[in-house]
Amino acid sequence: MEALLSDVSRVFLLELTMICALTLCGCYVTYTDIHFRQIPNGASWGLVAVGVIGQGLFYVWGAVELAQVGLVFLVGFAVSYVLYIYGFWAAGDAKLFWAFVLVLPPTLFPSTSLASFNAPLWALLLNALVLTCLVLLGLWAVLRRGRSAEVKVGLDASQWRSLGLELAGLIGLVLGVGTFLLAETMTFVEVMVAVLVLYLLVDRFVPQNFRLTLALPGLILGGYTALASGDWPIYLTLWVVSWGVFFLYHLIRHLAPRFFVQALPIPALREGMVPRMAIYATESEYRCGAEVEQGQDVLCYAGRPLTKGQVRTLHEKSVGDSFAPFGHALEVELAVPFAPIIAVAGVLTVILGGSVIQPLIELFSPWLPS
């Protein structure tokens, strides 16, 4: 009995230590990110150290397996790095997210498998994405005051109809394959994720002219399945939700250049800022554009955070008329402090023991089709 109590107490104390480290570090980086627009490396690396030690102790005590610890370390780093490469976060934000993934106690979650949305890594990522969308929409609502009330979402009516047909085809394909070929019942979240992933693949690799043709088998299969099973309300709900997700995506994508971009003089550029356009050299002058050709001398890339060397080079070449063709200024994306979002997402993940998606589904389950 004493040994059991000892095991319980040491696991509890380790959980408490990791949660305290997460909370204290979250408060500290929130302060530094808001007031000084930087996340100290010491805070992130310190939290990484606490997380690695904690995960190691959980393995030694038999609470988790070694493979799981390694996957959390490597996959967490990979996700953070991909988000940084694609410009979603700056380097400091990505490093902080990785540290938060490591410091989340795995014993507090119903599942630690990376195949589950309630695994610490995916739960933290989903919560951070939900909070990010809410913050961006709130900023848009504030910044749009006093500006033009006319808002277009970037797609015309025919494009929205095409998008709706494509999504309906993908939903029919996913549910039809799951019902007839795999003979499995997919959850609402699983269908949504499968549809979103398939759409991103189609959007990247399939030409626009062939997308409706590709969606036709899914429309036929989905229509037959919905009518034969009588589950057409589920199909309709999935279509409305998926259409709403992409509406929000296009809204943010279209409004970002209008409300989250600022033109700064070249000498005012700082490390970590994300330019909207690239600066590259031609045979006669420097130019500013969204794309560059292979072999050109590029001073900075669009959508990638500026490095210290790039900032130094830009400052040196800004003396004189080198950048006169584009007014000695460069549009940069307004920096949104993501450290508070990651910190709140971390605390929310600990409180819920998973992502916010499942509680939301349970909240609205009385109004969803069974």
Image: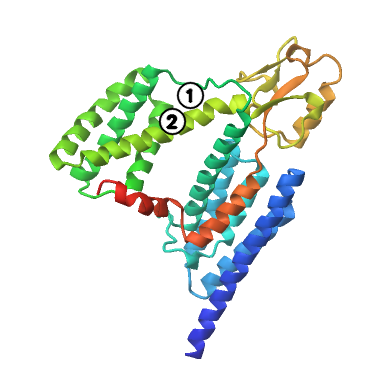
- Residue at screen point 53% across, 56% down: 348
Question: Which dot marks residue 105?
Answer: none
* Residue 183 visible (yes or no): yes
Residue under pointer 1: 153
Sequence-first disc among 1 and 2:
1
| Left or right side of 230 for 188 | right
Q: Residue 344, image x and y in percent?
A: 59, 53
Q: Seen from this angle, which residue lies furthest front?
A: 146
For the residues labelled 1 and 2, say whether their Cβ atoms are less than 8 Å apart. Answer: yes
**Left or right position of 300 against 137:** right
Point out the residue furthest to the bottom here.
Answer: 1
The type of residue carrying mark 1 is Val
Helix, strand or loop for disc 1: loop
For the residues marked 1 and 2, what is the alpha-carbon distance in whole angstroms?
A: 8 Å
Can residue 207 be seen in this snapshot?
no
CA neighbours of label 1 inside 10 A, class few (<14), some (14 to 19), many (20+): some
Q: Residue at x 71, y 46 (%)?
A: 33
The residue that appears at 62% across and 46% down in the rendered structure is 94
- x, y (%) of residue 369? 26, 46
Rendered image: mark on residue 247:
2
Does dot 2 land on a helix, a strand or a loop? helix
The percent coordinates of residue 292 (x first, y second) are 62, 19
Q: Is residue 359 above or below residue 202?
A: below
